[in-house]
Image (cartoon, grey):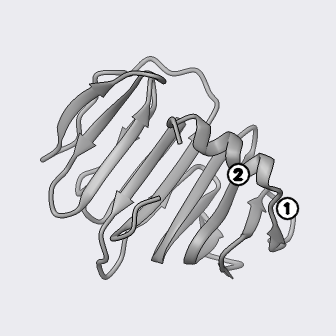
Amino acid sequence: MLAAGFVFMALAFQPAEGWAQTLPGCKATTLQDPVREVLDCGNGLIIDKEAAAALASQAPQRSLDLDDRAILIEVSPRDSFQVLTPHAIATVRGTVFAVDVESGTSSVFVVDGKVEVSRRDGSSAVLLGPGEGVDVRPGEPLTVRNWPQPRVDALLARFGR
């Protein structure tokens, strides 16, 4: 993993059209195995995005909206950084973490450090530590659990890690 920053992965599995997408102030490079695009947004923000991942942001240094597919983010220490999914808000608290958005669920897993996760409306916040994850589903409580290694490995493999 990355020693000097945070890594964030978000996954969603909905049909997508976009590929050669850039965000304001970001420079794109295409990588292979697996095919993905890396956006270098400067100031310690690098977004490794899966083919067809749909991102939006007016200010990528502060937050991103992810609507489908997957992203892996390296973000250097800063006051605040958020990734918003259809179901949840994941706020960096100094860490390496992953987010998976699929079929009405947003799941967040922490590799190192801490991540605060709440519902998209800001309610029901939980704080996750290393090895902990939470599945955010409408109408269900946020329950912090330890994730099995195969689940973690499957997420990271999508980025050649």
Q: Which type of secondary structure does the marked residue at label 1 adopt? A: loop
Please state the horizontal and vertical placement of residue 94, each as a whole percent of the image: 44, 79
Q: Nearer the viewer, mark 1 or mark 2?
A: 2
Mark 1 is surrounded, within 10 Å at the Cα level, by few (under 14), some (14 to 19) or many (20 or more) other residues, namely few
Q: Which residue is mark 2?
A: 152
> Which residue extends farthest top?
17
Q: Name above or below for residue 104 compared with residue 8.
A: above
Name the residue located 77 percent from the left edge and 59 percent from the top edge.
Answer: 135
Which picture quadrant has residue 38? Answer: top left
Q: Is residue 99 left or right of residue 67?
A: right
Q: Mark 1 vs mark 2: which is more N-terminal?
A: 1
Name the residue located 64 percent from the left edge and 43 percent from the top edge.
Answer: 155
Q: Is residue 68 left or right of residue 4?
A: right
Numbered mark located on residue 160 in the image: none
Numbered mark located on residue 139 in the image: 1
Q: Amino acid at mark 1?
A: Gly
